[in-house]
Amino acid sequence: MYNQGNLDRLALDPLRTPRHFKIAVMADSHLWYDELKVAVGRINLDPTIDFVILAGDFTKFGYADEYDRFTDIFNKLAAPHVVGIGNHDLQADGFTLFTRVFGPTDFSFVYRGVEFIFFNDNARGIRCCIPKFDWLETELAAAGDTLKIFTVSHAPPLSDQLDTAKSERMAGLFAKYKVALSIHGHTHAFEYSEKFRDGVPYLVTDAVNKRNYVTVVLDGDVLTVERVFF
């Protein structure tokens, strides 16, 4: 599967330097294929990027041809890349397509001393079990005292995908386990702030049509976030 193949590439990392890396983050490419192609080309010009995250909504309607067009472009990235699921990607037969092409919607991996936790939080209109909070807390707890934690989900708290109760529960878990960075898209508007003033920074990316992505550099305990325009 697509994500697992890229995670296998990350596992071959020869450096394995704890808490030192640079990643590129984007979301909401939808049908803006021309802009996505330019973004991929721009990222490929930066050999210091260790891997790339797309935090969902790489389709508009969840159609199979959109999955194909996206992967044809995104697979041209030189660096390993990992894709999360957005609410648009779940439309039509999107859930079946995502699991067939990319694998599970909820998964985690460890890279250079950081546990990355990807999860589906596209809960609008769904009463039960999204996000999978029990699974999420188990993953957060598994990091223990030795791993930093980055979480990745499409919708930030207090968006139209998450009601107040779910937003507060998510934020409470992130604060409890001292999440170092929570990465999102969905709103199509860049934001980098401590949403709940609890020490947890939330990063929300612009949509790709705004012609920028975000680089995240972790250098020990120092986190640097910067928009890169193309």
Image (cartoon, grey):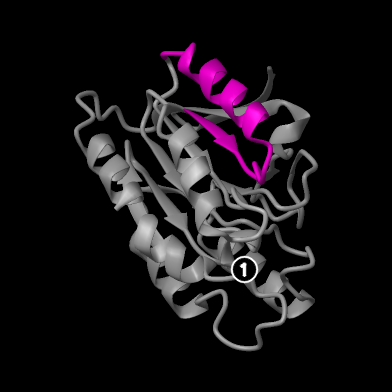
Q: Is residue 209 magenta?
A: no
* Towards the viewer: 22 or 25: 25
Res 179 seen here: no
**Residue at the limit of the structure toward the front, as seen here:** 65
Report x, y in % for residue 24. 53, 30
> Is residue 36 covered in magenta?
yes
Q: Position of residue 202 (x, y in %)?
A: 67, 47
Q: Is residue 23 above or below residue 104?
A: above
Q: Which residue is mark 1?
A: 91
Local packing at callout 1 (Cα closer than 10 Å; few below 14, some 14-19, many 20+) is some
Looking at the rendered structure, the kind of residue marked 1 is Gln
Q: Position of residue 230 (x, y in %)?
A: 68, 17
Q: Which residues are magenta?
A: 23-47
The outermost residue toward the bottom is 127
Q: Residue at x 71, y 75 (%)?
A: 124
Q: Position of residue 156 (x, y in %)?
A: 70, 57
Counting the numbered discs, the total is 1
